[in-house]
Image: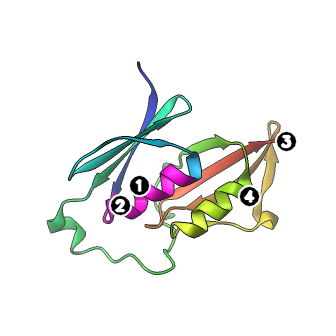
Amino acid sequence: MSQQGLVVFAKNKKRVSAFYQQTLGLDLAETGTSHDLLRGHGYEVVVHTIPRKYAASMTITKPPSPREDTPFKPTFVVVSLEAVRSAAQATGGYLKPDSGAWHFRGHVVIDGWDPEGNIVQFKQAE
């Protein structure tokens, strides 16, 4: 079955995988030393480990600083932004405060980031 998807490269595969599993309600379909395959809701997310020789030069701050210098921002429709907020906090990610949300095409839209600072947008139907 074909699904739309996203590949996220991570220094800490386990932590980033937990973020996407919990915020998006995805199931762990496959796991290996190099990747986790997460599936659900018609799409899949592959969390792929960054090779050690590259990861060694990366610093992930706590809390993570958003990586705003990328031209891509994945967007996901979710049932509850509050559930996403709780899951993001529990897994080391972040969701902007409700005051940072906006309304677009029948959705409440808000940005956040995963435990490594990758920007993600979440949308809840109004």
The residues colored magenta run 10-22
Q: Secondary structure at mark 3?
A: loop
Is residue 44 inside the magenta stretch?
no
Q: Nearer the viewer, mark 2 or mark 3?
A: 2
User: Cα distance, mark 1 to mark 3?
Assistant: 28 Å
Whole-Å distance between the Cαs marked 4 and 3?
Answer: 13 Å
Label placed on residue 108: none
* Nearer to the camera, 61 or 78: 78
Magenta run includes residue 19: yes
Q: Residue tagged by mark 2?
A: 14
Q: Tell whether label 1 touches label 2 (CB within 8 Å).
A: yes
In this figure, which residue is indicated by the disc labeled 3? 126
Check disc 4 and report the residue beneath it. Answer: 82
State how far apart marks 2 and 4 are (Cα).
23 Å
Q: Which quadrant of the figure contains the C terminus?
A: top right
Residue at horizontal 17%, vertical 66%? 52
Residues under labels 2 and 1: Cα distance? 5 Å
| Residue that label 1 marks | 17
The answer to which quarter of the image holds residue 37 is top left
Image coordinates for residue 82, horizontal then vertical, percent: 74, 58
